Image (spheres, rainbow, N blue to C red):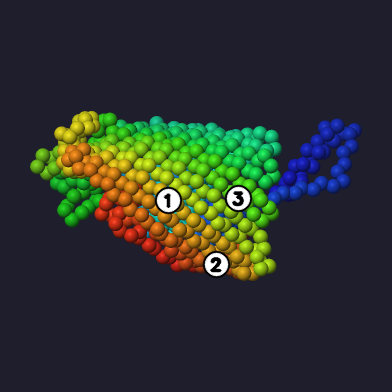
Amino acid sequence: MKSLLLTATALTALSPALAYADVATSIDEFIVTGRPAALALDHAAPAASRLGLTNREVPATLDVITQQRMQAEGLRTSIEALNAAPGVNGGTLPGSVGVTSMRGFTSTAIAYLFDGVRVTGSNSAIRNFDTFNFDRVEILKGPASVLYGEGALAGAINLVPKRARIGESSGEGLVSLGAFDTLRAGLGGNLALGDTAALRADASFSRSSGWVDDTDSLAGAVTASLLLKPTDRLTLTLSGDYNHDDYSTAYFGSTLVPAAVARDPSGLVRNAQGLVLDKATIRRNYNVEDGEMTSTAWQLRARADYRLSDHWMLSNELAGYTADRLWKNSEDVTFDAATGRLNRSTTLIAHDHDYWTGRAYAAFDGPLAGRRNRFTLGAEYSDTHFVTRRRFGMTTPVDRFDPVRGRFPEITAANFPGAGNRVDWVSDATVAALFAENAFNLTTKWLLVGGVRYDHVELERQTLDLNTGAAARFSQDYDPLSWRIGTVYDLASKTQVYAQFSHAVTPVSSFLFLNAANAKFDLSAGEAVEVGIKTSFW
């Protein structure tokens, strides 16, 4: 590359001599300098530590899917990006649009973060976001409760939006067209506001008609941030993010039927009762005509970093999140042998999810006993108010080949009869936490890393059965302690071996959905031992 640059620059400099033979040009000395791109393992790993460690220094498995890789591999959504990471499986389920599994766990055992902020009940908050808005996706595997509290037994996933950068102005756009009336577009850029400020905004939009009858979908997102550096010691970051998605009359799969009634039976799926998948109905949608699966979410975040000295840093951040979600569909369809038709259930679930959190910590990076020591001590507080309406009933049966789908029934006791089929829940959860981390260089090649976190969780739940009039209220407190200890040793400058032992906790189900019986259980605890090697080639 240096030779090419040298040749190109020399030719450019000599071009007057080539054009005008009577003009002499000479170059006494020409020097090209550059900085090689940092290797992936040498980047900071904020999802894995608050100590400023690089991926190479973290005694755990951390995968990072960058925006560059997303573009190179055509990873359009966060689910596609997560599936590109080794050992991670993602998908879209009716109740969890962006659900993920890894290391044998799913749902409440994985902490989902958006720009480092984890919402209580994050498995409900996760969606299938457009990757255009993200700078990278960080995937920390293994227990991560020492960083994010309960519910991180399998690991943590941090979706990091593109954020403002001082000193650069740039822009980018994206347009993509595809089958089934699919459109994807994005536009964004970074604007330098002098030497001490920058503004960035990115917007994306996508839509599709779907490959199944009447399954239109659309999604839109706006991420924006303002970065201020009024002094050399103080950095302020303000950000706001908006996400919306709408899956109209979503498709919930083709039901199994007896082989004798299938017009085009498939051997792909079979069971002991002789039921098969009928390929003749694979594109039929049996959802009600006004089915909905939508989500609208806002997040605001402010962060201040102040450098007290060459060794001490103070950080303080405040974040708020609010979301409204609605599922109103006929999700479960079963074949009725007596009538030859499909019986359909109805489900309506609505969420009103409000959350705010504050986190402050002090960080030290300096000598201790003649060795480098990095230390963080902080506190965190969060408050969640969660309201959900749940309605379960039945609607009209339909023909398998020519369904008259109808509309979602009116929300009345007659249409949703029985105990437990019209229930309102209100959940309030507060979490107060203390945490500490430390990384000490025993030698220049040998690093010892440790961390501990204590959480005090107060949960209150109210339920009201609108059909029976029965009301219930309960409260429960939890005091989990999470910790980890690990070590990293440099076999060579680009090759490290590591080991870690960690202890983490998770509830039986999400705190926001615990019933009175499950709330009495202690948090489930998990311990993990991990050893590995990290190295860079070429």
Residue at the (59%, 44%) spot, across then down: 304
Q: Secondary structure at mark 3?
A: strand
**Would residue 182 be seen by someone viewing this image from the given angle?**
no
Residue at the (64%, 58%) spot, across then down: 365
- Locate the C terminus and report the quarter of the image it occupies: bottom right
Q: Which numbered disc, 1 or 2, marks the residue closer to the eye?
A: 1
> x and y percent of residue 203 in the render?
51, 33
Q: Is residue 278 left or right of residue 122?
A: left
Q: Which residue is mark 1?
A: 431
Q: Which residue is mark 2?
A: 487
Q: Which residue is mark 3?
A: 314
Residue at the (10%, 39%) spot, across then down: 339
Amino acid type at mark 1: Val
**Would residue 10 be seen by someone viewing this image from the given angle?**
yes
Residue at the (23%, 43%) spot, across then down: 471
Pick whichever of labels 3 and 2 is earlier in the sequence.
3
> x and y percent of residue 380 in the render?
49, 50
Mark 3 surroundings: few (<14), some (14-19) or many (≥20) residues within 10 A: some
Q: Secondary structure at mark 2?
A: strand
Q: Secondary structure at mark 1?
A: strand
Say which of 117 and 537 sits in front. Answer: 117
Q: Is residue 291 above or below residue 62?
A: above
Mark 2 surroundings: few (<14), some (14-19) or many (≥20) residues within 10 A: many
Amino acid type at mark 3: Leu
